[in-house]
Image: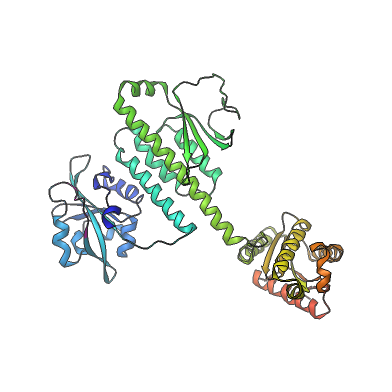
Amino acid sequence: MTRSILQTRSSEWPLPPDPGESRLLLDLFPDPLIVARGPSRKVLAVNRAFMELVGVSDHSEMRDSPLTDWIHGDDRHRLLSLGGDGESDPIPIMIQIREGDSWRSVALLGGRRLSPHGDERWVYRLKILEESGIGLEKQMREQRKRASEAVRTSLRIFHLTEKIRMAPRLSALLIGVKDESEFYERAGQLLSSEGLGYREVCFWSLQGDQKNLIWSENPQVDTNGNRDDQDQSESIRSLPLVTGSGRVERVLELRIDARELQLLREAPLLMEWHEEVLGTIAEVLALTLENLKLHGQLEQQALLDPLTGISNRLHLTSQLEKEVLRSRREEQPLGLLFTDLDGFKQINDVLGHLVGDQLLIEVSEFLSRYFRESDHLCRYGGDEFVVIMPGSTLEDVRKKAEELLEAFRKHIFLGGRTDEAGKLSLSLGITQLRPGMTGEELLDEADSALYEAKRNGKDCLVVVRGD
């Protein structure tokens, strides 16, 4: 198992022309990497993964120190013999490496290489084998692994031309994107930049037989993909962005410069590596989009109530603090409404919990239609709901609460079946942010008012005026 995971040759790892560039390139790799020199293997560069493994925060602490200082005494001779003939050993060795005050067993692979300037260097890769999780997070880790492999592919041809040097920069640029809009903007601009030099870069979405323009650097391309010059020659390339499931939902389209295309035609070897670069770019873009989708699913699961589809308590907590800060910064009022269903327990007892769940869904839909888009409706838990109302004074919230009570009394839920279990109504507590209050205090105050409304006979509201 270890041998199959570590079958990548060290000749496929980057060896930058100067140490100042090493950290930037090595940090692209998820596994710990080391570049050393000389018989004692003095450290030239390590990546962030190695620093985290051995517990070092400052790269200068390791600079020019013997790598053997970090290897257990029983294993140092094995390190020095690895790749001693000038080639990378294909089979990893097991050694113990310093991890704080203890030792950790790792698999190590590597050997001797020459830098672009002809200097002798030693490049080592460490692998830590751990059991991965399952489900969505496992998919995300697999996507990261595949993205790293795509980066590694592009790095193999890093020194051939200036265009190839830009491929890893594309990967590095896309690491921090947060949404698709930012992704298309960043990727499109880099593909169109002087380094890569592609022209008329476009991103398209595919829905069945329909092709829709998402982003374009070329004003001559309309939303249907037609060009003013009607040039459909081989200089126009269409690259499908294939997801992990094999679907193609996005397509990258670009034009190769005519002079470069002529050079590629005359040199089949250059044409071959150029095709590999295009494939690497397409894979990096596809993997980044797939990760954005997986992250979006995780965020949705974390912030939305799975039953009703509205925001959950976690989202309420973070959003309330943001609105409190904004209210103070902009000197605008902030109201809060806390409500609870009266008679919900009887619904569950008489009609069953599945019917109770359906009632919660209908109540959530009713409340969603009733409040503004700028208000934040959240399911606090059970049959309790909270509404954050930015820009609303206490009087605004009171009027809205009274109208809500009246509308709720007239609304028919579950096709009238709620009458079989008794009366269904709302109890409400409302308040307004005052100087010195925190979001937690505001919520607690509305919660106390809600339970006072229940003690007062239910189907009513209690207003906290703060005086």
Residue 118 horizontal side relative to residue 158, left or right: left
Q: Quadrant of residue 195?
A: top left
Residue 458 horizontal side relative to residue 440, left or right: right
Q: Nearer the viewer, residue 391 or 218?
A: 218
Q: Is residue 130 above or below residue 344?
A: above
Please indicate, yes or no, whether residue 388 appears anywhere in the rendered image.
yes
Give x and y (percent) for residue 103.
Answer: 25, 69
Q: Quadrant of residue 71?
A: bottom left
Q: How many marks?
A: 0
Q: Nearer the viewer, residue 21 or 203?
A: 203
Tell me which secondary structure the magenta stretch mostly adopts: loop
Q: Residue at x 32, y 42 (%)?
A: 155
Q: Is residue 228 above or below residue 435?
A: above
Q: Residue at x 34, y 56 (%)?
A: 48
Q: Is residue 177 above or below residue 299?
A: above
Residue 86 horizontal side relative to residue 216, left or right: left
Q: Residue at x 65, y 69 (%)?
A: 439
Asked if residue 152 is among those painted magenta in the image, a careful observer would answer: no
The outermost residue toward the bottom is 455
Give x and y (percent) for residue 402.
Answer: 85, 66
Please indicate, yes or no, whether residue 391 appears anywhere in the rendered image.
no
Q: How is the image coloured?
A: rainbow
Give x and y (percent) for residue 467.
Answer: 79, 76
The residue range painted magenta reads 86-93
Residue 433 horizontal side relative to residue 35, left or right: right
Give x and y (percent) for residue 432.
Answer: 75, 68
* Image quarter in which the N terminus is found: bottom left
Q: Residue at x 81, y 71 (%)?
A: 424
